[in-house]
Amino acid sequence: MRRNLWLYRRCLGAQLRATLEYEGDFWIMSVAALLTQGMGIVFLWAIFRAIPQINGWRFWDVVLIYSLVALTEGIAVLLAQGAWSMAVTVNLGGLDTILVRPYSPLLQVLSSQIGMNGLGNLALGGSLFVAALLHVGVAWSPGRIATAAFVLAFAPLVKIGLNVLTNCSAFWLKTPWSMFPFAFHTLGELARYPISIYGVVVRVILSVVLPYAFMSYFPATAVLSLGSSSWLGVLTPVAAVWCLLLGRWAFRRGLLRYESAGS
Amino acid sequence: MARIEADDLRKVFRSPDKRPGLAGSLRHLVERRYSEKVAVDGISLRVDEGEAVAYVGPNGAGKSTTIKLLTGILVPTSGEVRVNGIVPHRNRVENARGIGVVFGQRTSLWWDLAVRDSLELLRDMHGLSTAEYWANLDRLVEMLGIGDLLSSTARRLSLGQRMRADLAAALLHDPPIVYLDEPTIGLDIEVKDRLRAFLRQIVAEGTTLVLTTHDLGEIEDVCSRLVIIDHGRIVHDGGLRQVIETYARERVMHVDLAARPVSLAGIATRLAGATVIEERDGLGVAVTFDPLAHTAGDVLTAIQAELQVVDLRIKEPAIEDVVRRVYAGQLIPGPDDSPDDSPDDSPVR
Amino acid sequence: MTAAVTLPSAPPRRTPTVRQTLRAYRAMGRAAFRSLVAYQTSFLFGLLATTLAAVAMLYLWRSVLAAGRVNGFDWPAMKAYLLVAFVAGSLVSSYVDYRMAGRIQQGDVAMDLVRPVDYQRSRLAEALGFGGYELGTGLVVAAAAAALFGGVPAPAHRSLGAFAVSAVLVLPLRFGIVYISALVVFWTRNYVGVQSARIALITLFSGSLVPLSFFPGWLQGLAAALPFAGMASTPALLYIGRLTGADAWRDVGVQAAWTVGLWWLGRAMWRGASRQLTVHGG
């Protein structure tokens, strides 16, 4: 376990050095991340200028959920962006060399990329998170702080696990494009808003089938004690482990049917 | 001791039979029809410690698929495989510690990193001690001449440089088994020679080597055993000499004549089963014969009985001829199959 | 397309007639359409992604407007606004620029330079080809979403003419922005970032998520100074009848002016880019 983590850091570090060769990319990606996330906030702000609350959620409550999506996205992109390379790695044969190295293939894949938009997401998400916490008017007890820290630490793992799960479709779809997992990524973006606004089908999908809501909405309810299901937020670590296990299971199933490229 | 044991390995690839267009895609969801392609069809192979095996066959015969099965990249459809005593695809990490792999078409180096950084990452993955790492690296740097490549980024290397760096990466942990899939494809002669010398040396040091290649010289230079595969099956497995005796027994005797002969029919009558062809614009004759049916002396006697011989050469088939015919898909065993007329200016072996 | 001038002194190299040139562009458009059909599965998953985003917006606005009219928008009008914006946004999705950026990055664009057709017009022809497919699938999705959310009102009679003109202008206007952003790759190398920045800007300032009238005054002013409103807001407001009479034609005029302006800006950028390509060898 320690060795695995240490090697993971080594691989990421090497990747970071490689990525920094292209300094221009870093700035472009950071600006793009700021614009993308900033656009979402301006959008929320424009709506909340007109009405005080949606389903009992006020502006800063929604900003808190929103900031959690930006933060989890930032962490997933910085630490496990390799999941998004699977369509190419699997279907253009790059997995071959990974499979003959003595280190977990899944961990190698995950650490094979660093998203340069991660820092932008983290910076904006972090500031929004702090600003939201200052405005939500929650009474902070040691218990609540501990709960919040515990729950929030696991939220990014939900996203990473689901990224792996959906990107494993590469083994079955056999195209070097990631459109299928991207569609699910967009589904995950639905968790930027309180999921109580959705119909029951969408809510079940987001909280049970592909529990994207555990990267933002449920942790936020736990922190704020808001909504009828705030106790669910405490289950975030369970959801995280479940998603990671699902991802690993899909990857292993995929390796069984991996056909490499050519003959 | 057997390093590699494969028993009745089969690999079947399945590809969906989809009709074009949206309607085709939807229909496939309901009907699910596949066409199957048998890439490897019941291969059994045993490679002992220290052997150097050339694995050849025409394109699409299943060479690369076999290598991918042996290295644990692919999971066999049926059959068993053991490498260093373990099942590669079930225990990939353990398996990877005991093998080194080079795919000629694809690098295992990190594209945007300096070669040295790639090697250090591999060192850590293999868990080599500093002492082991330096000892192996020094040796590889010297043998492959890659000292001044270490600080270059992999993407800046030429093909030949990259291949040498890739070999160093594959051998860094001193694996007992090395698989090379087309390692010299696209390289110039000087680099090829260097690589061959290197391969001879590691084989001499006891490394087990499995090599797929189109390069005939490489087979003769490095390998002692030749496995020929076609349509996913092994059609020959044995020593190099033995291959020649099985597949290309016939010799060709070329004689130069003092004068143009009136007819060659007499020679053919004296030598049953041999082929007689006029060459050198009538001033020469080439007789192709099976040495088990006629000795070279018999053939010469028969020619001299009819014509006046000035000079003669005997051409034995080289492994090249066999392999070239394998790749051309013309391998039919036995002496009945006359070889394509071999150019008579090729050197006598 | 160069005008069909026949040079009497050079008979072997005939300048193609207008009709021949048009035929070449039509062929390119058809090829683009067919290639989208070939990559259908990927395309449909991409469409699913944008559909999910649109569905999220519909849910969100349903909750916002549950209590009644806000800023003059009621729920039926808002539904229609969002769906028109969705269909408009599905045109010139990332295929034209994705291909352009890829060819520029790999240097294949040099091959396009030696073709006997105009580069920008060729890309527009392709965008039109893709557009046929995008419009078809976009309308199907919008109709399904409309059914799911209880139907949408028909387009307003008063501004129908202006809506028709505005709708036709959406594709060339979007093409202008997409084309320019893809050309940026000549200078930046990275396209993913440029593309997502462009998407963010369009999404916000075209009013496709929230009508621009929800913005405070200064932000509305900024949006009005940018070319994006014509990509969603203008046709959507015309559809629901929020923009009528002289205002309607003024906004359509602005949309048309931007369409032409971006076309010429794109031409100027291409000239600069191809000069760089021919001088520095890519």
Image (cartoon, coloured by chain):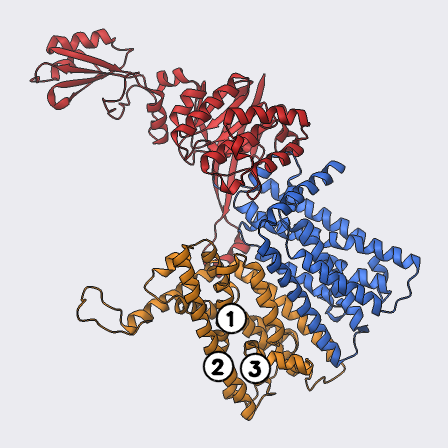
With B337 as the anchor, is A123 left or right in this view? right
Q: First in sequence: mark 1 or mark 2?
A: 1
Expressed as whole percent of the image width and height from the top left, the position of residue C192 reads 57, 59
Indicate which label's residue lies in the foreground, 1 or 3. Answer: 1
* Residue underneath mark 2: C257
Question: Which of the pair A121/B85 is nearer the observer?
Answer: A121
The residue under label 3 is C234
Q: Is residue B45 above or below residue A16?
A: above
State the SS at label 3: helix
Residue B134 in the image, given as x and y percentages of width and height? 63, 26
Q: Chain of mark 1?
A: C
Whether tag 1 and tag 2 are in contact, CB under 8 A, the answer is no
Give above or below for C79 relative to A228. Answer: below
Give the label on residue C177, or none: 1
Which chain corresponds to the colour blue? Answer: A
Residue found 34% across the figure and 22% down from its top: B333
Q: Quadrant of residue A55?
A: bottom right
Density class for disc 2 (Cα within 10 Å; few <14, some 14-19, many ≥20) is some
Q: Secondary structure at mark 2?
A: helix
Q: Secondary structure at mark 1?
A: helix
The location of residue A69, given as percent across then percent down, is 72, 61
| Spatial separation of the CA atoms under disc 3 and disc 2 | 13 Å
Q: Which mark is residue C74?
A: none
- Same chain assignment for discs 3 and 2: yes
Q: Chain of mark 2?
A: C
Give the chain ID for the orange colour: C
- The residues bearing labels 1 and 3 have C-alpha atoms spaced at a distance of 16 Å
> What residue appears at the point 18 percent right and 67 percent down from the top-left corner?
C11
